Structures are given as structure tokens and as C-alpha cells.
Image (cartoon, rainbow, N blue to C red):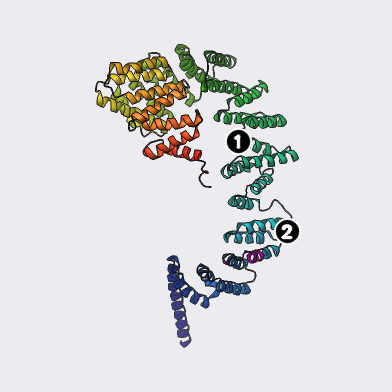
């Protein structure tokens, strides 16, 4: 019984001691967090004397914070003698030397650890991890490099070295690591491209990659992954001709079905490299009618020619030639699900560029009746046909089609588009109250473009009905707006110029300027568009179209008039003067890009 009481006494004493240590430890941590390092050290020193191993890290960290390097060195050497195989303590000693300014002494310690490494993959990885945790990435890299030598395997530790080289922003070594791994792991190509695109900062970096790739291709021309990466590199440098050349050469060498070339052509189109995309599609067509991509390439070739012509200055003959190309294509392949998209493009060309409403109407009516047409494409064709009905003086047929699509696709992007077209139909025909009700709902649309357009049109109606309850001037403006939509610019200008004569007290002056700017943009008259937009900013700086005008000017100067400094100024004006604008996020992104900021995360 007496023995049991003694054991209980010592157990209670031990628990009491532990509780006391716990309280002291928490107090020391609080002192350290508050920057009261001397107070923290007093407690840690006491605890360290009681248990060297348990309180070593806290004790030495506090000593280092107080720059008491000699005491920190002594404590570390003591624990190294106690645990000679625990390399983390040697790394800590080296970091003490570095903090004290004795880098050479630290490096000698670290080199000693690396030289004494055994040929054991786990030990090597463990030491590198300890270096990295000690914020010494350089020696983590050296450890892995030594590990490769010891284990006679240059493929080891690739992923770890990629991470370290990326952290160190060591672009040449990072490039070499990726080029080493890609032949055996081609699925890493996308990861490599993403890494390079975020890390590389200019032409010099991409030139370095190109030279490294050309050397690899020369040594091993059968490695298609290098050619694919070289194609990507040319795309990053906007050298679209060379990118296509590489893809064509690879396709010929591997006797492929051309799918890589077809995918590349889509990227070229997205970058407005229409001539290169046309050359790519012509290559695919030249492979023969029996090839799987022949029909798709024929269709996309004409669509690309359409984009090229309509994106620049064109004459009537260009449009007529395009129309013939579409008609010949549809004649060759028939009116079916394969050519339905081309039929939609033909109809849009006929209605908006050639103003052949009846022919366009027939083309889309035929497309909608194709049995196997994709549902989304049929819905899009219905909406476009509704537009033609509206322009061809068949308004009720137009709204019927819009309503059909809206009901078939509720709460979707195409359903919201249908709802917006129905609201615009009401606006064009003078039913402003109903139009505004629909537009107010669409202000919360998932499509930012539709939401923005709906907001602007709703405000336009509200502002003008408040001034003129009869809405006569607004009816004229809506009619001009319809002519702009139909690309009947001359008719639109005549109506716009008549509004102030017929209704001199209207509130549409900024709206008329915006409408004229839109017409100038349709006609590729960017200088005239800029002049009208500047008038809006000068004469109506707080009205509906002010922030639109500022952003549009930025876009014109950036992408059409090639004055990056002016573009930057207008984007900055959105940020500083129009904080509530829907364009602010895009303006901020473009401003930072023009200023030369690095992408987020670097």
C-alpha cells in the first residue's frame, strides 16, 4: 500500500511538472509572437535545460532572433554530437553561419553533407527536402544532381528539379529538364507549355527554347513532341507562318490524318492569322477527298475567307466570290447536317453584306428542316431567321421564332439571347414599355455581353421616355438602330440626321453620336469612330455612353490605330473616372498588360 502511494505521489508530481511546462511554453510562444524575444528566451532557456531535444528548435530560433549566434552555434553543435546522423541539425548550423555572415563556412558544411551521401534514393530525397525546408533551394538542387551521379540515373528526381528550377526561375535548367522528360512522358507537354507561358518574359526566353528544341530535333528527328513544342513556341512569338510550317512538315513526315493541322488552324483563326489558316485548310483539302477532314476543311476554308474579307476593307466582288464559294460547297455536299453551319454563314453573308433577304431566308428555312442538324445549331439558325423576318417586314414571324427558342432553352445562354432579341424586336417596333420590362430581367443574364447590352438599352429607353413620354424621337432613333443592325448605313445616317430637325428638344444627342460611331466601326473608319467617341466624352462625360466611349477608344487605339500609349490612357481613365463601369475589370487587365506587368502569380 505504501508503495502504491509513493507511485501515485510521483505521478501527480510529474503531471504537475508537465502542466507547469505547458503553461510556460504557451507564455513563451506568446512573448515571441509579440516580439518580446528576451522574455521568451528566459523561458525557453529554462525549458531547454530541462529537455535539450524537445525545446532545441524554439530555443535556437529565439537566440537567432536576438542575434546571439555564438550561443545558437554552441547549442547546435551540442545536439549534433548527440545526434550525429540527424542532418537537419547540420543544416541549421549552416543557416546560423549564413545569418552571421560566414557563408563559406556554411557552404563547406553543406558540401560535406552532399559528399557523404550514400547511394540511397530515399536518403538523397530526404536531405534535399531538408535543404528546401531550410529555404536553401540551391543545395537541394545540388543534392538531387549528386544523387543522379551516385545512382547513375539521369532520369531520377526530374519532377523535384522542375519544381526547384521553377521556384528559382532558372529558365535554362527548367527547359532542359522538361526536354529530358518529354520523350518518355509526352503527356507532360501541356504542363510544360503552361509553365513556360507563365515564366517566360520575352523574346529572349522563347529564343532560348527554340534553340534548345532545334538541337534536340537535329539529334532525334523522330521525336514528334519536340516539333509540337516548337510549333507552340512559334505561336507564342506570333510567328504564325513558321508555326504552320512545323505542323505541316510533321504531318507529312508522320503521314497523319491532319487533325493536328486542323486544330492549329483554329488557333490561327483565333489570332486573326487568316492567311496561314487558309494555307492550312488548303493543305488538308489537298490530301484528298477520301480523307476524314476533307469536308470539314472545305467548310472551314470558306468560313476563314469570310472572316478575312469581312474583317478588313472589301469590295463587292469579294463578297460575291464568297457567296459563290458557299453555294458551290453546298452543291457539292448537299444540304445536310455537315453543311448546316456553312448554310448559316451563307445566309448571314447574304442578309447583312449582300442584302439578299429572300435568298437568305430560304437558306435558313432549309437548314432548320434538316433532320440531323445539331439542336443548338438549329436554335441559332432560328434566331438568325427571326432577324431576317424582322428585316423583311415579317415582324410576327420573327417574334414567334424568338419565343420558340426562348421556351425550348430556358435559363441558357441561347435562351437569354432569344429573350434579348425579342426585347429588341419590341424596341424596334416602338413597344418600349414591354421591351424595358424584358431588358430589366436580362440585366441579370449569365452572359456579361447580353447583361451589359440589356442594361444600356433599358437606360436608353428610360432616359428618353422620361423626357418625351410620347417617345416619338426614340421611335426614329430605334428605326435608325434597326438600319445599323441591317448594315444599311446610309439609311441609318439619314434618319439620325433627321432626329434633331424634327424633334429639336430630344435627349438623344449622345445616343446619336454613339450610333454614328458604331456605323463608322462597321465601315472600318476608325478615325471617324474615334472622333465621335471623343465628342461623347467631352460633351456627355456623365451620361449613359460615357464609359462605353472611353473603353471603345482604348480598344480602337490598341487594336486598330496601334497607339498603345493612347490605349493605356483610356483604359486608365475607366479605372480612375468610372469605377462602377462594367468594363472596369477588362480595362484593368488590358492596362496592366500594356504597362508590361507580369501575369498574376509571378
Which is the main secondary structure of the residues drawn in magenta?
helix
Whether residue 294 is situated above or below residue 47 in the rendered picture: above
Residue 335 % position (x, y): 54, 16
On residue 150, the disc is 2
Q: State the separation of the CA atoms marked 2 and 1.
A: 40 Å
Residue 22 % position (x, y): 45, 72
For the residue pair 387 and 276, the one nearer the viewer reads as 276
Question: Total of numbered circles in the picture?
Answer: 2
Residue underneath mark 1: 237
Apparent side of residue 371 relative to residue 182 in the rendered image (left or right): left
Residue 546 % position (x, y): 36, 31
What's drawn in magenta, residue-wise?
Answer: 100-110
Residue 54 % position (x, y): 53, 72
For the residue pair 52 and 397, the one nearer the viewer reads as 52
Which is more N-terminal, label 1 or label 2? 2
- The answer to whether residue 539 is magenta is no
Whether residue 319 is situated above or below residue 130 in the rendered picture: above
Amino acid at each position: 500500500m505504501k508503495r502504491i502511494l509513493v507511485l501515485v505521489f510521483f505521478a501527480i508530481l510529474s503531471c504537475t511538472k508537465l502542466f507547469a511546462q505547458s503553461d510556460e511554453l504557451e507564455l513563451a510562444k506568446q512573448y515571441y509572437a509579440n516580439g518580446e524575444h528576451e522574455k521568451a528566451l528566459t523561458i525557453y532557456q529554462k525549458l531547454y535545460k530541462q529537455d535539450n531535444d524537445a525545446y532545441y528548435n524554439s530555443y535556437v530560433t529565439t537566440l537567432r532572433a536576438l542575434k546571439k549566434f555564438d550561443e545558437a552555434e554552441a547549442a547546435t553543435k551540442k545536439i549534433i554530437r548527440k545526434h550525429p546522423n540527424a542532418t537537419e541539425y547540420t543544416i541549421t548550423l549552416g543557416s546560423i553561419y549564413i545569418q552571421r555572415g560566414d557563408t563559406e563556412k556554411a557552404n563547406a558544411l553543406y558540401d560535406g553533407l552532399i559528399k557523404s551521401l550514400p547511394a540511397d534514393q530515399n536518403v538523397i530525397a530526404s536531405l534535399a527536402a531538408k535543404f528546401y525546408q531550410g529555404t536553401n533551394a540551391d543545395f537541394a538542387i545540388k543534392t538531387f544532381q549528386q544523387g543522379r551521379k551516385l545512382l547513375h540515373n539521369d532520369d531520377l528526381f526530374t519532377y523535384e528539379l522542375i519544381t526547384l528550377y521553377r521556384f528559382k526561375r532558372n529558365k535554362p535548367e527548367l527547359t532542359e529538364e522538361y526536354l529530358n522528360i518529354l520523350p518518355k512522358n509526352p503527356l507532360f507537354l501541356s504542363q510544360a507549355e503552361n509553365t513556360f507561358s507563365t515564366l517566360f518574359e520575352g523574346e529572349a526566353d522563347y529564343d532560348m527554347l527554340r534553340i534548345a528544341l532545334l538541337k534536340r530535333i537535329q539529334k532525334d528527328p523522330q521525336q514528334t513532341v519536340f516539333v509540337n513544342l516548337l510549333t507552340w513556341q512559334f505561336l507564342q512569338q506570333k510567328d504564325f507562318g513558321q508555326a504552320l510550317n512545323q505542323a505541316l512538315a510533321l504531318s507529312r513526315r508522320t503521314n497523319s490524318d491532319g487533325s493536328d493541322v486542323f486544330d492549329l488552324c483554329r488557333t490561327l483563326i483565333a489570332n486573326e492569322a487568316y492567311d496561314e489558316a487558309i494555307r492550312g485548310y488548303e493543305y488538308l483539302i489537298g490530301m484528298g477527298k477520301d480523307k476524314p477532314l476533307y469536308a470539314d476543311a472545305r467548310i472551314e476554308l470558306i468560313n476563314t475567307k469570310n472572316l478575312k474579307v469581312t474583317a478588313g476593307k472589301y469590295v463587292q466582288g469579294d463578297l460575291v466570290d464568297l457567296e459563290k464559294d458557299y453555294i458551290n460547297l453546298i452543291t457539292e455536299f448537299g444540304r445536310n447536317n455537315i453543311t448546316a453551319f456553312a448554310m448559316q454563314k451563307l445566309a448571314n453573308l447574304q442578309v447583312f453584306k449582300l442584302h439578299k433577304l429572300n435568298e437568305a431566308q430560304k437558306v435558313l428555312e432549309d437548314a432548320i428542316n434538316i433532320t440531323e442538324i445539331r439542336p443548338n445549331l438549329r436554335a441559332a439558325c432560328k434566331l438568325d431567321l427571326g432577324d431576317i423576318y424582322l428585316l423583311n417586314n415579317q415582324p410576327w414571324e420573327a417574334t414567334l421564332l424568338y419565343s420558340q427558342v426562348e421556351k425550348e432553352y430556358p435559363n441558357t445562354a441561347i435562351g437569354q439571347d432569344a429573350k434579348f432579341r425579342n426585347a429588341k424586336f419590341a424596341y424596334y417596333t416602338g413597344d418600349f414599355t414591354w421591351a424595358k420590362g424584358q431588358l430589366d430581367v436580362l440585366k441579370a443574364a449569365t452572359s456579361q455581353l447580353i447583361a451589359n447590352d440589356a442594361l444600356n438599352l433599358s437606360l436608353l429607353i428610360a432616359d428618353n421616355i422620361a423626357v418625351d413620354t410620347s417617345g416619338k424621337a426614340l421611335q426614329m432613333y430605334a428605326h435608325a438602330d434597326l438600319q445599323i443592325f441591317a448594315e444599311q448605313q446610309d439609311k441609318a445616317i439619314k434618319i439620325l440626321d433627321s432626329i434633331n430637325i424634327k424633334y429639336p428638344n430630344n435627349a438623344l444627342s449622345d445616343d446619336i453620336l454613339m450610333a454614328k460611331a458604331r456605323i463608322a466601326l462597321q465601315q472600318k473608319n476608325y478615325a471617324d469612330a474615334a472622333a465621335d467617341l471623343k465628342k461623347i466624352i467631352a460633351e456627355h462625360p456623365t451620361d449613359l455612353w460615357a464609359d462605353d466611349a472611353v473603353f471603345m477608344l482604348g480598344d480602337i487605339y490598341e487594336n486598330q490605330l496601334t497607339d498603345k500609349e493612347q490605349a493605356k490612357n483610356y483604359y486608365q481613365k475607366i479605372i480612375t473616372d468610372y469605377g462602377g463601369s462594367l468594363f472596369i475589370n477588362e480595362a484593368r487587365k488590358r492596362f496592366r498588360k500594356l504597362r508590361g506587368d507580369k501575369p498574376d502569380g509571378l
